Amino acid sequence: MADLPGHVTIVEVGPRDGLQNEAAIVPAQTKIELIERLAAAGLPVVEATSFVNPKWVPQLADADEVLRGITRKYGVRYPVLVPNERGLDRALQAGAEEVAVFASATEAFSKANLNRTRDEAFAMFVPVVERALEAGARVRAYLSMVLGDPWEGDVPAEQAAEQGRRLLDLGCYELSLGDTIGVGTAGAVQDLIGAFEDPAQLAVHFHDTYGQGLANVLAALQCGVNVVDASAGGLGGCPFAKSATGNLATEDLVWMLDGLGIVTHVDVRAVAETSAWICAQLGIQIPGRVARALAG
């Protein structure tokens, strides 16, 4: 197919975004093994955890233990999410070399997720990003609800782009555009990416609620994006947006990219085996289609 990149970087978000919504607490050692398995499968970026207040996300209360406990593979990055300066302090003390902040394209979700307006949240991020960069850490940004919001409905492309540009201008090296509730379509994705000047600064993060995840990735790749977030097994959701179902499954993404001849350096079968393993630990069926097919 024309206009596709030769290489795609996959950001594996399963250990954080995939597990954060699970009701039963997953032991730290299981999380560590999951991260190490995913790195061994060839994933170049594995988001390890989040230094949020344990009161809000109890599943990630062991963030310090998990980040310190990883045997890091050479060449693999292990970013962590931080909501504020306190979270940044904890992350840096635990050895984080890359952090991520997370904002919302809509007022409603910003208030639900961060208990702040968009402007108030941005003001909170300014010292986080500045201090992280001063400490030598890279900073990534997530922008949620870029295509639709359960309270506000469809989100205009320019509204999302305006918020995203603010984060990039602050010094974040990359902006991950999140369709948090999975309502986006390929046309809407291309409209959104077209509202930015440089798609090379963008990543995409799709939930597969309506089965549009892979189609939306393909649309983004055709617009010049070459970084895609995904979660092993298709695990995930959002504790603050009940209509958000699982992320796009990493193995489903790799299967499609392999078929297109796009290089990822990821072993799809190793990821599928890891997905089957973590779902067994959680006592759930595998959401991802490729892992189910290979397991069968």
Image (cartoon, rainbow, N blue to C red):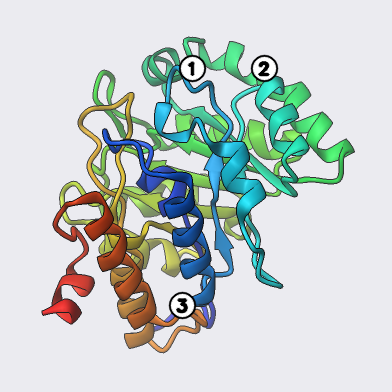
| Above or below 43: residue 50 | above
Q: Nearer the viewer, mark 2 or mark 3?
A: 2
Task: Indicate the secondary structure of the residue bearing disc 3.
Answer: loop
Q: Residues within 10 Å of mark 3 (few under 14, many from 20)?
A: few
Q: Residues within 10 Å of mark 2 (few under 14, many from 20)?
A: some
Instruction: Identify the mark at residue 124; answer none if there is no mark.
Output: 2
| Apparent side of residue 284 relative to residue 172 in the rendered image (left or right) | left
Q: Residue at x 89, y 37 (%)?
A: 134
Give the quadrant of the N terminus: bottom left
Q: Residue at x 38, y 20 (%)?
A: 109
Q: Residue at x 45, y 83 (%)?
A: 262
Residue 41 in view of the camera: yes
Task: Indicate the secondary structure of the residue bearing disc 1.
Answer: helix
Q: Residue at x 87, y 39 (%)?
A: 135
| Apparent side of residue 68 relative to residue 27 in the rendered image (left or right) | right
| Above or below 109: residue 11 | below
For the residues labelled 3 and 1, the Cα–Cα distance comes to: 38 Å
Q: Which residue is mark 3?
A: 3
Tag 1 or tag 2, which sits nearer the N-term?
A: 1
Residue furthest toward the left? Answer: 296
| Above or below 287: residue 7 | below
Check if mark 2's residue and mark 3's residue have beta carbons within 8 Å.
no
Query: Identity of the amino acid at label 3?
Result: Asp
Tag 3 or tag 2, which sits nearer the N-term?
A: 3
Residue 79 in view of the camera: no
Question: Which is more toward the observer, 13 or 122?
Answer: 13
